[in-house]
């Protein structure tokens, strides 16, 4: 006696087919969701990752000085890399020294605070906010006018900014 598919067996087969369809749909939805999430993460990093500045401001000393000449040479070198170097003459030693030591400008103190905050964050944590703050500090430092006698202070500040930027890049 041959067995034929009865109503119960048809119902079981329909349930199995229905489960297969649901699993396929869940798999497709999961793959689509993963693609969207990966694309969103990539776009966020591509759009939000800060780029190095394309414009740099440099204090050169008085017009006609050797420092002004070296500034022009640096401008040519920077231009080859696509960076606009703005050269500014010094307004005077006292004003520039006052700017570096002015607690209102506070670039050095803010930089140290930012560096401490970076060191306290766990590896892998988002540091885009710190990078944006560092960009602002660097922009302020680039606008300081420094006489030749005190350029070592500005050089040290810029070096410190560069070191903190390197730390950020490694995160």
Image (cartoon, rainbow, N blue to C red):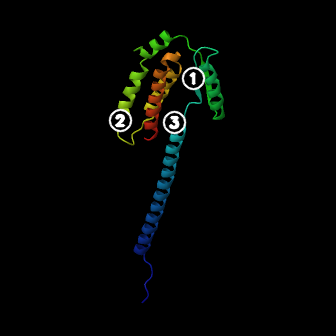
Q: Name the residue under label 2.
A: 119
Q: Name the residue under label 3.
A: 48
The answer to the question of whether label 2 and label 1 lie on touching residues, with beta carbons closer than 8 A, is no
| Point 63% across, 14% down: residue | 63
- Residue at mark 2 to residue at mark 3: CA–CA distance: 21 Å
Q: Is 43 above or below relative to 149?
A: below
Q: Where is residue 12 in the image (x, y as percent from the top left)?
A: 41, 71
Q: Is residue 62 left or right of residue 5?
A: right
| Point 57% across, 26% down: residue | 56
Q: Which mark is residue 57?
A: 1
* Label whose residue precedes the other's in the sequence (2 or 3): 3
| Point 52% across, 23% down: residue | 139
Q: Residue 33 carries which label?
A: none
* Label whose residue precedes the other's in the sequence (3 or 1): 3
- Residue at mark 3 to residue at mark 1: CA–CA distance: 24 Å
Q: Is 102 above or below relative to 16?
A: above
Q: Where is residue 125 in the image (x, y as percent from the top left)?
A: 39, 40
| Point 45% across, 16% down: residue | 100
């Amino acid at each position: 006696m041959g067995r034929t598919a009865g109503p119960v067996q048809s119902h079981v087969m329909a349930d199995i087919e229905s489960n297969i369809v649901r699993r396929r749909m869940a798999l497709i939805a999961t793959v689509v969701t993963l693609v969207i999430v990966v694309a969103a993460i990539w776009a966020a990093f591509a759009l939000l990752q800060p780029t190095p500045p394309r414009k740099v401001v440099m204090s050169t000393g008085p017009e006609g000085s050797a420092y002004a000449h070296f500034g022009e040479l640096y401008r040519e070198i920077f231009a080859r890399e696509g960076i606009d170097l703005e050269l500014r003459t010094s307004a005077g030693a006292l004003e520039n020294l006052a700017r570096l030591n002015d607690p209102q400008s506070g670039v050095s103190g803010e930089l140290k605070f930012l560096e401490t905050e970076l060191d306290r964050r766990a590896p892998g944590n988002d540091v885009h906010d710190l990078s944006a703050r560092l960009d602002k500090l660097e922009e302020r430092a680039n606008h300081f006018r420094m006489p030749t006698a005190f350029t070592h202070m500005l050089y040290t500040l810029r070096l410190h900014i560069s070191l903190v930027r390197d730390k950020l890049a490694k995160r």
